[in-house]
């Protein structure tokens, strides 16, 4: 199998590369030192398996794996982790492959044989059970054939239009593969639904005001006049929007 190694510590990557090199049936096709590099290399190199460290600065292993699982043809993922009783219980309960650090050859061989592709739901369950955040810090999009990460902190709103969801953010707009329903569930603390097809960032709301037609609209910081979509609050969501604004 072709394997991508992801770890923020160079000695850990060196050890894995050496162990894999001793097995003629596998090949290391790349190494990454953080989650963003991992996504770019996984997209470019198309490995069969990603050996993925969990605790990394920036984008941790769980979030990286969730973005990888959304690929059209995702590689299998095996996590590497220092001993953590709760993490191990979560991996085993959800049939997620893992290797304890320091990595032993026998365990590495077994994990590679059992490597499996993971769903976003399964990874979310692991995150919740290990105490890691089940909420991503980014959403992923494609621009000119390349994967790009958009920080949730930069998102103004998510807008659904038939089969597509547009993320409107500080640097423009992009299409993403996530459904509005899944985004609402994942980011319920940060976003509020104002309409059947719109979620807005609560901390970006400046005011609620009626437009010339008497409809209630949300005014967002950074959502300028060049935006084509008026952010109208539907009647069924008015009470919830007001409640969320009071509680922020």
Image (tube, rainbow, N blue to C red):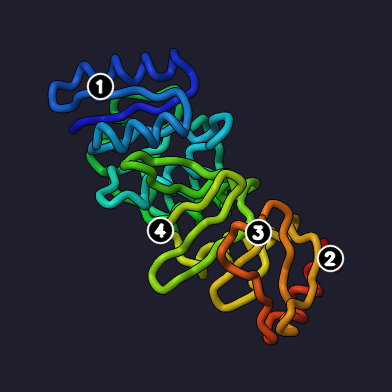
Q: Earlier in the sequence, mark 2 or mark 3?
A: 3
Residue at the limit of the structure toward the right, as seen here: 246
For disc 3, the marked residue is 225
- Mark 1 touching mark 2, by CB under 8 A? no
Residue underneath mark 2? 247
Residue in the image at 49% along x and 23% along y: 8
Where 223 sits versus 91, above or below?
A: below
Which-is-in-front pick, marks 1 and 2?
2
- As measured in the structure, the alpha-carbon distance from the residue carrying label 2 to the one carrying label 4 is 30 Å
Q: Confirm whether residue 45 shows in the render.
A: yes
User: How far apart, in angstroms, are the residues tagged by discs 2 and 3?
Assistant: 28 Å
Dot 4 or dot 3, earlier in sequence: 4
Q: Choose top left, top right, bottom left or bottom right for residue 56.
A: top right
Question: Which quarter of the picture shows residue 229?
Answer: bottom right
Q: CA distance from mark 1 to mark 4?
A: 34 Å
Circles 1, 4 touching at the beta carbon (< 8 Å): no
- Element carrying mark 2: helix
Mark 2 vs 4, N-terminal side: 4
Q: Tell me: 67 left or right of 241.
A: left
Q: Nearer the viewer, mark 4 or mark 3?
A: 3
Is 210 left or right of 137, judged from the image as shown? right
Q: Which mark is residue 20?
A: 1
The residue wearing badge 4 is 177
In depth, the one of 156 and 81 nearer the eye is: 156
Which x, y percent locates residue 29? 24, 24
* Mark 3 / mark 1, whichever is N-terminal: 1
- Seen in the picture, residue 76 relative to 38 is either above or below; the reply is below
Mark 3 is surrounded, within 10 Å at the Cα level, by few (under 14), some (14 to 19) or many (20 or more) other residues, namely few
SS label for mark 3: loop
């Amino acid at each position: 199998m072709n394997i991508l190694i992801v770890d923020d510590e160079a000695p850990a990557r060196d050890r894995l590369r050496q162990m894999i090199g001793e097995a003629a049936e596998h090949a290391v096709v790349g190494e990454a030192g953080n989650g963003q590099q991992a996504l770019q290399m996984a997209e470019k190199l198309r490995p069969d398996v990603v050996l993925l460290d969990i605790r990394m600065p920036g984008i941790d292993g769980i979030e990286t794996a969730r973005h990888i699982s959304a690929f059209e043809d995702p590689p299998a993922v095996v996590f590497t982790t220092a001993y953590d009783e709760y993490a191990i219980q979560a991996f085993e309960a959800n049939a997620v492959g893992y290797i304890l650090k320091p990595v032993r050859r026998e365990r590495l061989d077994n994990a590679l044989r059992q490597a499996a592709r993971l769903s976003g739901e399964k990874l979310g369950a692991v995150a919740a059970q290990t105490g890691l955040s089940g909420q991503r810090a980014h959403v992923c999009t494609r621009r000119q054939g390349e994967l790009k990460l958009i920080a949730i902190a930069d998102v103004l709103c998510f807008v659904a239009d038939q089969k597509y969801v547009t993320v409107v953010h500080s640097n423009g707009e992009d299409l993403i593969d996530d459904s509005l329903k899944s985004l609402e569930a994942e980011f319920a603390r940060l976003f509020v639904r104002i309409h059947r097809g719109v979620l807005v960032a609560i901390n970006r709301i400046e005011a609620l005001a009626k437009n010339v037609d008497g409809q209630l609209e949300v005014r967002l910081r950074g959502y300028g006049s060049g935006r084509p979509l008026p952010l109208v609050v539907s009647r069924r969501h008015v009470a919830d929007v007001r409640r969320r604004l009071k509680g922020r």
